Image: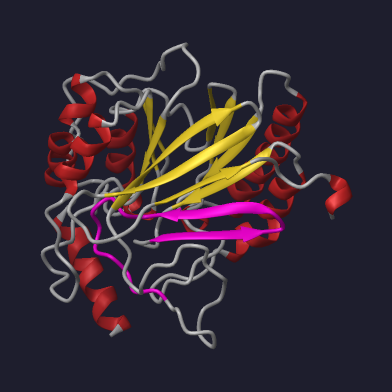
Amino acid sequence: MRLIGIIITSLLLLAHCATPLPPKVPFAKKPHQISPLSIAVIGDQQRTSEMEVWRERNTIHADLVKQVVDSKPDALILLGDQVFTGSSSDDWRFFDWIMVPVKKKRIPVFPIFGNHEYFGDDAVAYVNMVSRFPVLHSTWYTVVLDSIAFVMLNTNFDEFSRDSAVRELRWFKTRMRQLGESSGVKCIVVCGHHPPFTNSTIVPDEHILQQYFVPIFERSEKSRLWLSGHAHAYEHFRHRNVHYVVSGGGGGPRQILYLDDDLRRHDDFYPGGTVRPFHYLLLQRSGVSLRVEMVPLAGQESAGETFVIDRAPTRNDQ
């Protein structure tokens, strides 16, 4: 089965080599200055490939984006895998179409790179990303929204050299220290496409994050939440009192999760089944607390989830 997947992926990469497809108008990048802000999050919006005949094929992408826009967020974060093939003009046309309501409302958009953004010709895929999102001066960056610092990682470690990975880690250490010392930052949220923790039957925990990045994150008293996608599901974990949420419900083919005690890797706070609802998140700060709401796509027989993170552990808690 793995060999078949490799062959199909190779064929897809050959089929989707293309010239870049810049948008007519890039997404906005400046949020409102009011407070509190409502910040929406969507993960894994890619379509199922026509050649992935064994996977779920969904048509909910535009409906979910419309529901997000109707909730009137002040900013939107995308957790990677906006498209199936990063260099495919057809895939980006579809993405531009479903995101029309976001542009009409001029909602600022802050994305990260998923593994699918590297499918196809890397140079073409990169232009397709940066031409849409002016905020992308680097594939990892920081944005502060209403005193919440979002540290946007590139977790595609197999796509760049060891030196680049070390450079990103050093940058992460420095930024976490600077944000911890900044009086203008009340909460820190990390966004990275690959999850450090997941019960997915398809994708594993990202051990590089577990070993090198997570300990730095958990040492900060301002750390509240780590967001990821890649696993097409909704999962909610807590590790040393810091919350980790997998939010991959934007329309990609959903993945089955391990639930049995002898198979699952982590305890999940969300009482869902093996397949989770399509969904998005809404974040809002109140003082140093962070309110997180998972909102299912309308029409699904699935419950949402809301929780408040009051603080990260202090050094005395360790």
- Direction from residue 187 to residue 218 in the image, left or right: right
- Direction from residue 91 to residue 282 in the image, left or right: right
* Whether residue 18 can be seen here: no
* Whether residue 181 can be seen here: yes
User: Which image quadrant for residue 286?
Assistant: top right
- Direction from residue 87 to residue 160 in the image, left or right: right
User: Which image quadrant for residue 8?
Assistant: bottom left
Please give the count of numbered marks on the rendered protein. Answer: 0
Residue drawn at (29%, 82%), measured in percent from left and top? 3
Residue drawn at (29%, 31%), measured in percent from left and top? 71
Of residues 138 and 107, the one drawn nearer to the viewer in this rendering: 107
Of residues 221 and 86, the one drawn nearer to the viewer in this rendering: 221
Residue 138 vs 203, above or below: the answer is above
Quadrant location of the N terminus in the rendered image: bottom left
User: Could you tell me residue 139's position as x and y percent?
Assistant: 47, 37
- Direction from residue 133 to residue 314 in the image, left or right: right
Q: How is the image coloured?
A: secondary structure
Residue, far bottom: 262
Of residues 94 and 274, the one drawn nearer to the viewer in this rendering: 274
Magenta span contains residue 269: no
User: Could you tell me residue 216's position as x and y percent?
Assistant: 73, 48
Q: Which residues are magenta?
A: 234-257
User: Could you tell me residue 172's position as x and y percent?
Assistant: 66, 40
Of residues 49 and 66, the one drawn nearer to the viewer in this rendering: 66
Quadrant location of the C terminus in the rendered image: bottom right
Residue drawn at (32%, 82%), measured in percent from left and top? 2
Residue 245 vs 138, above or below: the answer is below
